[in-house]
Each structure stands twice: as structure tokens, then as C-alpha cells.
Amino acid sequence: MMEFIFALAVGILTASGVWLLLRPRTFQVIIGLSLLSYAVNLFIFGMGRLRIGVPPVLENAEAVDPAFYADPLPQALVLTAIVISFAMTALFLVVLLASRGLTGTDHVDGREDAQ
Amino acid sequence: MTGMLDHLIIVPILLPLVSGAVMLLLAERRRALKGGIGLATTVALLIVSIVLLRLADTSPADGSAVKVYQLGNWPAPFGIVLVLDRLSALMLVLTSVLGIAALLFSLARWHRAGPRFHTIFQLQLMGLNGAFLTGDLFNLFVFFEALLAASYGLVLHGDGIVRVRAGLAYVAINLTASFLFLIGASLAYGVTGTLNMADLAARIPALSSGDAALFAAAAAILGTAFLMKAGAWPLNFWLPTTYAAASAPAAAMFAIMSKLGVYVILRLWMLVFGPDAGPLAGFGGGWLLVGGMLTIMFGTVGVLASQSLSRLAGCSVLVSSGTLIAAVGTGDGAVIGATLFYLVSSTLGIAAFFLLVELVERIRDPGADVLAVTMEAYGEGEDEGLADEIGIAIPATIATLGGSFIACALLLAGLPPFSGFIAKFALMAAMLETDGTAVQASTWTMIGLLTVSGLATLIAMTRSGISSFWARIDDRVPRVRIIEMAPVLALLLLALGLTVGGGPTMRYMEATTQALRAPQGYVTGVLSTERVGSAQGRANP
């Protein structure tokens, strides 16, 4: 059940993200990128296998069974990915504002379609 | 792993990082000091990377002695390692050569066009060097992001509507590519349980068929991300616009950035899907070949249709990327050697061209490009202005610019005496070299495309050259400073030097190829390296 909900969440986030990414307004694009990054972060997390209530850190070094522990590496990767995508979103926001200021429109092409 | 020489491997990453950080502390108006620090850093980088190149070249040709630097002193599959072999050393040297040229060029005027240019420039160098050196998939992602973040800054450097508009698309497309990268990397981790490239290669043959299919998916997603950076069709519509909009020194650095995509594909593909990879051996080669050829076609059409010189340069990036991708896709040993030669030669050529475009555009009126295409299409304007041009002494500036332009055209089109000729010749010769079997149709197509793309480049360059240099020279002789001209000339001379030193260079490329073709050497080299001080039982800080 958990796997199903998890997959559903990733799927819906990705689908909404891609759809928004293809929209013509810069704000929609940035929200789309954010949703995509959530989906990707969940996906990375899922790649460490979904477990509930297991510690990621080995307590004593001798003779432990790794099956009782969660994989800490994907969690570290997610952390890195979150930080990076957060920074990139902020940077994109600046470019977006600059574009809005310079072109006077929030269309991704920097100009409105001819009506 | 003892002695100072071993720590040299991390210098190409640390040095620009430190100097970039230091320059952040200096006030914006102290440009001369910043320029001096930046230049000193890039020169030091060049020296270090040449030393590293010589170091890498001393190892036996089967690649069994790659130099491994363990960050945090953890052995390979667990800790992140930097790996120096011939390929990465070659790319390091190329990066620092372009770095010096672009930085020197920018000192004339571009570094004044926006804030914190020098810091961003150094961070870009750090990202590139790190991506070339790292032996870890996720670390590669981090360095990719570092260099991309810096490149966003460089694209936007100089401001203006065109740059912001191009930058918006550039940032969006690269963020999307980064997501693909992350999905591919984490999927690869989910399947194999490792992110170390060498360990990855070692685990591929043992995968069950279901896992192998998943890994193939991961590799395909990763490949898409890298192809996006490299500018493979149909993921490259952003590239000419962005590169044309970027300031000249930034665009010259981007010439190596799109080669980074090719480098990663070459590295990972040869490593992971080599002959020992079992059912996955040679996975995706056909896709690379076809994708590369389509990219050449797209680039060729783009070169012919370009109405401005900077767009023409952007489209030449596509032609060069396409050639490289297709050549990697053949997976043939001899072809890879020639591919590397072509990579170096075309990167030098394109970078020189991007710098030159900026200078040439100072002489011509903006309409001249559009006119060149239109005039040819309608056959007009042939009969005017012939009489009074005889006997005009061409000023030395124009002569130098024109000479460099011709050299660029010859280099990009692949005509002698420049290295582009040797590169293309070696590519074709290697592709035709089959052991008695008939030459495949795809090979003929590729050779045809190479020839046609060269011809198209020559036509387009001639056309633009005529309209900018043989047009009337009015009173406007452009002011070109010597530090702007010197980098262009130096890059072109280097390309000429590649021709003269073709033998030793080709020998180096052959050794690189041999090491790439025998990935076991890389794998055992990385995985068997002990941690420092393990013999004494205690790590040395």
C-alpha cells in the first residue's frame, strides 16, 4: 500500500510538473520545476527502498545485519539535491524577475503572442 | 599516495575555488587586481594541468595505473575519489588553455560589463575541472551544478534583453536536464547499489536480466541528460540562441562546456558498456550514431541558414558535437582516437571563432549578415562597387582579423594546414578501416555528412567573410586591442601546432583510446587503491 501511494505521489507530481513546465507563463514554469524537483527527490529516496521505522545509522560496528537498517546514502543524496534545486530555483526566480522587468511580460518568450 | 605530487590532482578544483572566493571579498572597482589574480590562477592551472598530463602519460597504456585521489581518505567504493587518467588530463589542459584565452580577452572590456565576473569565471573553471576529474556519479552531478550555476551567471553577464531571454530558456532546460541526471543516477544506484563509476562498471556483468533492463533505462535517462548538454538533436534548439547571446569570453568557455557532455558519454559509455558488460555491451551505440548524424545535419542546415556570425558559431558547435557523438557511437577503437583529436581541434577552433566574431562584428553594420544571405538568394548587388576598391591599403587590423577569419574557416571546415583537416582525415580513415569486411552503409552516410558539413561551413564562412571583409571599408577601422587579438591568434597557433605535432598528439590519443578500450585497468586501478597510511594503521591527515 505504501509503495502504491508513494508511486502515485511521484507520478502525480511529475505529471503536474511536466504540464506546468510546458505552459507559457514563467511563473507556471518555475512552479513546474519545483514540483518536478519534489518528484525527483522522492524518487531518489525511493531508490533506497521504502522502509518504516528502521534506523539509518549502524549502532555497533561488529556483526550487524544490514537488512535491519535503512540505506543512508539516498537520504544524503536527497539532501544534496534539495539544497541544489532550492538554490537553482532561487536563481531562476531572479532571471524570471529580470525578464519580467526588461520585457514587461511574463511570457517565456519575452513577448506576447499576436492576438 | 605520498608526497606533494599526489595532492596535485585536487589543485585544479581547489585553486579556482579559493581564488574565486578571495575575489568575492575584493571591492568591485579593483578590477585590475581581480584580473591579475584571475590570470595568475588560470596560468597556474595550465601549468598544473600540464604537469598532470605528463604524470598521466607516464602510466602504461593499458590504463592500469590511473592516479586516484581519495577525498577524506576513504577507499574507492565508499568514499568519493578523483581519478586522473589520460582523458581527464587532456580535458583539464584544454579547459585551462581556453580559460586563459577567454580571460585575457575579457580583460579588454567584457569584465567591466557586469558584477563579479571574475569570481563566476573561476567557479566555472572549478566546475569543469571537477567534472573532468571526478570518479563518482553523484559528485559529477554536484560539479555539473556548480559549473551550470556559474554558466547561468556568465550567460547573463553583460545584461540586456537578448541575454535574459536566452538565459531564461537556458536555465529552464538545464534544470530539466539536471532532474533527468538525478533520476538516472539514483536509478543506477537503486539497481547496482553504488555510485562509483569504476564499481558500477565492475558490477554490470553480474546483473540479473531484470536489473540489467532497469540499468539500461537508467543509462538511457543519464545519456539523455548528457546529450542535452552536448547539444544533440532534438534537444539542442536552445544552444545556438544561448551561445550567440552570451558575451564572447563566456561563449568561448561554453565551447568546452558542450564538450563536457561528450566527455561524460565517452567516459561512462566506454567504462560501463565496454566489451565485458555481458548482455549490455555496446548498449545504445546505434542511438548515439543516429543521434549524432541527425545533429550534424541539423547543425549543417543551421550553419547555412545563419544570418549572424555568432549564430553561425553556435551552429558549428552543433556540427562538432554531432560529429563527436556519432563517432563515439561507432565504438570503434581507432575512431575514438581520431575523435579525441577532433574534440581538441574543434574546441580550439570554435572558441577562437567565438572570440573573433565579437571583433569582426565591430567592423560590419548589423544588417550585413541578413544581406549576405538575401543577396545570395536573389543574386543582387554583384555589379556595384568593383571599380574604386583597387589599391586601398588594408590596415593591419583588418588584415589580422581577416587572416584569423580565414584560419578559423579552414580549421572549422577541416581543410589543411590546420588540425581540423588531420582530425577529419583520421576520422574517415579510421571508419573506413575494416578488417576485410564491407564498409557499412552507416559509415558511408557518416563520411558523406562529414564532407557535406565541412563544405557547408566553408560556404557559410566564405559568404560571411566576403560581406564583412571585402565590403567597402569606410572610415570605420575597428579598434581592436592587442589583448583581444592575442588569444585568438594563440588558439589558432595551437591548432596549427596540433598539425605540426600531429605525431606525438596522435600517439597520446591512441594511448588514451587504448586505456578507454580496456576499462578493467581503470576499474582495478580505482578499486585497488589503498587508503593513505593504511600500512601504518593510522590515517595521515
Image: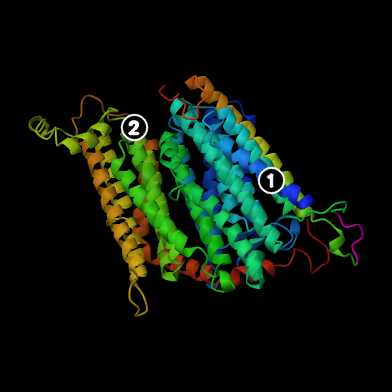
Residue B110 vs residue B425: left or right?
right
Tell me the residue at 45%/40% (across/down).
B238
- From this viewpoint, which residue is outermost toward the left? B387
Which is more toward the observer, B266 or B527?
B266
Residue bearing mark 1: A10
Q: Magenta-highlighted stretch: main secondary structure?
A: loop
Q: Where is residue B98 in the image (x, y as percent from the top left)?
A: 46, 46
The circle on residue B504 is none
Hey, what amino acid is under mark 2? Val
The Cα–Cα distance between marks 1 and 2, rounded to whole angstroms, is: 55 Å
| Colouring used for the render | rainbow
> Which residue range is magenta in the image?
A57-62
Depth check, front residue: B253 or B280: B280
Relative image position of residue B124 (x, y in whole percent): 56, 42
Q: Mark 2 lies on which chain?
A: B
Q: Is residue A61 magenta?
A: yes
Location of residue B185 by image quarter: bottom right
The residue where tag 2 is placed is: B480
